[in-house]
Each structure stands twice: as C-alpha cells, then as structure tokens.
Image (tube, coloured by chain):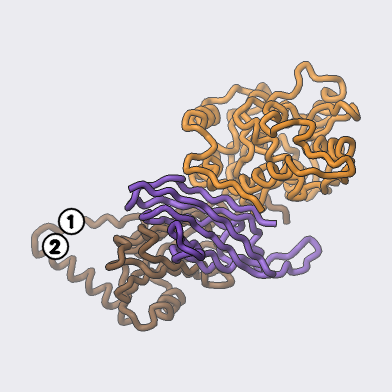
Chain colours: A purple, B brown, C orange
Amino acid sequence: MARALVTLPKVAKAGEVIEIRTLIQHAMETGYRRDSDGAMLPRSLIRRFTCHFAASGKAGPGDLVFATTLHAAMAANPSLQFHFRASSTGSFTFAWDGDDGFAHREQAQLLVNA
Amino acid sequence: MARELEVVSAQRRRLLRMSAAGTLAIVLRPLHANEPPTPLLADLVKGFAAGAVTREGRVKLDIAPLVENGNSVPIVISVDSPQTDASHVTAITVFNEKNPQHDVAQFTLTPLAGRARIATRIRLATSQQLVAVARLNDGSCWTHYVNVVVTVASCTEE
Amino acid sequence: MASRIASRRSCWSMREALLLTAALLVAPVAHAQAGAEARRSGFTYATPSTQALQQDDSQNPAMLWVADGRVAWNKVDGEARKACADCHGKIESMRGVAPRYPAVAAASQRVVNLGQQINQCRSTRQRAPALAAESDALLALATAIAFESRGMAIAPSQPAPAALKQAQARGKALFHERIGHVALSCHDCHDTLAGKRLGAAVIPPGHATGYPIYRLEWQKVGSLQRRLRNCMTAVRAETPAWGAQELVDLEAWLMLRAAGMPLETPGVRP
C-alpha cells in the first residue's frame, strides 16, 4: 500500500504561481540490486506521474499541468516539486502509475480568490 | 563536432570584442558554467532534439558539486521562461553519463505550470556528467552540462 | 488509502525549527570519556541538502512512515478488536514516551526498546501477532510514536531501575569491546576517532538521536538495531539476531550516552 504526501497552499490569488510538492512511498527497485542470497531483485518502478487540474464545475480530471516519465535513476520514495499558475477554484488529481500494477491517486482542492 | 567549433568560435569572438574595447577582463568561470559535453551525452541530446536548433543556456541544472550519497541526489532544473501560452517550456529531459541506463526523467510542462522550475532527487552510481535539455514551444532546445563527484558511504551493509 | 495533505507550512513552527537547529549546533556538553567531538549530533556532519531534508516535513521521506504509523495507530487489530487509540487515546498522548526507551516494560519487567514495547502491547492487549522486526509496519508505528517527542531531551529513567542499570552497564561493556576481523570497538571509532575521517565520510560520535532514521544508504527508514548491525558487518563481526539482548543492551547504553540531547526523530543521514 502506498503512502503519499502532497503539500500545497489551500488558498491562492488569481494569477499567483504556487509550488506543489509531492512525495510517494516506493522502493523504486532498479533491477540492479541483489538480495542477501545473491538473487537479483526484479525491477519495479513508478513509471509515470501526472498532475491535472479541473476548474470547479468541470467534469473529469481536467487539464494537464505537469507530467514526469520516471526511470531507474529517480531516487526511492520519489519527490517531485513543480509549480502551478492559479486562475480559478478547482481540484487537482495526482496520479502515479508503475510496474506490477502500481497505481496511486491523490486529490487536492485549491480555493482561488480574485 | 560542428557544434563544438561553433561554441569555441563564439567564445573567441567575444574575447576579440572585449580586447578591442580595451577591457580584457578576467572572466571568472561560474561554478556551473557549461562543461565540455561528453560525446555520449551529446549524442543523446541530439536524439532528443531531433534536428532542432540546440544551444547552451537558458536552462540551469542545479546540483551539488560533491554528493554525499549517490542514492539520493537533489537536483533543481529551472528555465528562463515566462511559461505563458506565447512562450513556454514544453519538455525537459535529464540524461546521465555513467549509470546503467542513461535516462533519468522526462518532464512535460504546460503553460498551466506557471514556472519552469522542477525539483526532485535522483540516483547517481558514480562521479559523472549530467545534462538537462529543455525544449521550448518555438521548437528550440537548450542544454546545461554539469559534472558531479559522488562519494561512497564507508560503512555499508554489504 | 488516505494520506495527509498538508498546508504549505511544515509541521514545525519557525520558532521550533530554529530552536532545535540551535540546540543541535551549540557547543555540546563535554562527556568525561570522549574527545572533542563529544556530543555533536550526526545531523551536524551531514551536508546542507541532507540537513534540509530532515528539517522539511514536506520533503523528509520518513514522514511517509509517520503517516503510515498514524493510520495504523487508529486501526483495530487482533482478537481483542482494539486499536492503539482505544487504550492510549490520540497519538499525541505519546509525547514523552520515546525519550525514555529502552525502558523496563511493566508487564515483563524486562528491558525493551520501543519496537519491542509496541509488540508487547500488540500481543498482550490487542491479542494480535507481533510485527516482524524491521518490517515497515513496525517501523511506521515506532517512527510515528517517537515523532511525537521530537525536540524533547533524551531521558532514560534516572535513577535507573536495577534491570535498566544492568542493561546499560552490559551495553557500555559491549561498546568498549573489540569485535570482528578488524578488531575494532564502537569506542575506537565513535569516541577516540570521532570527527576524523573514514574514507570520504566524517566519523560521527554516534549519538542515537534520530531513530528510527531515514538513511540515504538504505533508501528507507530503519531502526537503531539495523545501524548497529551495519557497523558490526563493517568490522566483519557476527551480527546478533534482531532483538537480541546484546543489541538492546547497546541501545540502552547509547541512549544514556546521549541523555539530554534532543530527539530528532525522524532523522535523515547519509
């Protein structure tokens, strides 16, 4: 079971650029490590992260803000920090997908004042 | 090869301009001035650029010159761009020279991102060169090559 | 799959963060037996980026384990169908607990570390199976509980009850005993050579102030016992089993050695 932490302000002014920080628990097994018996630990990585934003009232996850294709060179418990230009109140959908059926979703609200 | 000559002659032209003006100052090399690119990374950049004009500058790959543990190396990639509909970064890619695989990550940005600045943590197997390549919506590509020294932990479990 | 979505401010108030950093960097109380590196936390030897990782709750990967532990705290478990919260209330009530461990467990009258205490509660109160040593489940609970005491002085019971005093004395003897093919004792490196280098790394005095800790080398959270076993492997000594008396005794001595220093859990180290 994955644990994720998403950090962002609850409120922003229209036009303000805010910072979003994400952190998710995942070993990001490279496929190059061996266990204590010498057997190769199979590769198992988060492959893709996306952040979408949907203005209030709009159906679906909304528009793409930021995405990342991750490879074995990304550190374990991957951290991704990026920005967002606030324009209207709405909600974010954060999605992590990877090997062995790994899938995790988080949501967050943003209240935007004029 | 042609691109390297292009860079060198640009530097020579700048030096000539400065000496002509009578002010040949000592140029201090900033800590993360562009390193000469290794051929392997230059090739990967060429593949990513796919024929687009590629220049050094505008993108900055911030990474500590000396890394305490290669398992978790913080990096910040920032691009000098207003990130508006008219002018924005569409993609950034980071390649490494000496890990078993050369891809680190590909980032997709949109004007909604507001600022072209990404921070994350990566893994480096050993001391090596890295490159960040940014593509703008006008199709141009920009690079920053950086050398990193990675030390290994002394007390390990193995 | 709940998670914590924090506001932009970290858990620490600016004042708390400054106070803890000041406490960590201020000239330490000299320990009679040790050298000049007497009572510096390993935090002070880490690079600025590693220090920054420890100080930012939105970035410290160990906070993922704290979040897991907080969920587990409220989860009903075992034949008794009880959650930790049913007996102990909110997890915030655990403030002041971790700085006392290892301690004498009331039920068994044996010296146990925090992880063993958690398992004792699980088996006697929840009638649930013990969580495996060094499992993420156990580490999450231990980290979440110790997190509640962050900033408090490490404080093993003083005067120590007999069982604890004996454990500390045994631990101190082990700390000074040369082990392994390399024939080094903890004291040789972490007292006598503290502040000097082993390879590229500075040898810290080894005060156990940040456990359970996120070690970049491990790429996850781990216990003090894991770190001790690492060192023993490094000097080519046999490693005791998880939870072995020798390891608990060493922990008891280390926490007495660090008494008065602030608890940093969850620390981040290379």
Residue C191, quarter of picture: top right
Q: Is residue B27 above or below residue B4?
A: above
Q: Are marks 2 and 1 in contact (CB under 8 Å)?
A: yes
Q: Is residue C28 above or below residue A93?
A: above
**Residue bearing the label numbered 1:** B25
> Residue C140's spot in the image, x, y percent?
71, 45
Check chain identity for marks 2 and 1: say if they share one.
yes
**Residue bearing the label numbered 2:** B18
Tell whether C146 sits left or right of B108. Answer: right
Residue nearest the observer in this picture, A54 or B5: A54
Q: CA distance from mark 2 to mark 1?
A: 8 Å
> Residue B147's spot in the image, x, y percent?
44, 62
Q: Secondary structure at mark 1?
A: loop
Residue C211, quarter of picture: top right
Density class for disc 1 (Cα within 10 Å; few <14, some 14-19, many ≥20) is few
Protein chain holding label 2: B
Density class for disc 2 (Cα within 10 Å; few <14, some 14-19, many ≥20) is few
Q: Secondary structure at mark 2?
A: helix
User: Quadrant location of the N terminus of chain A?
Assistant: bottom right
> Residue A84's spot in the image, x, y percent?
40, 56
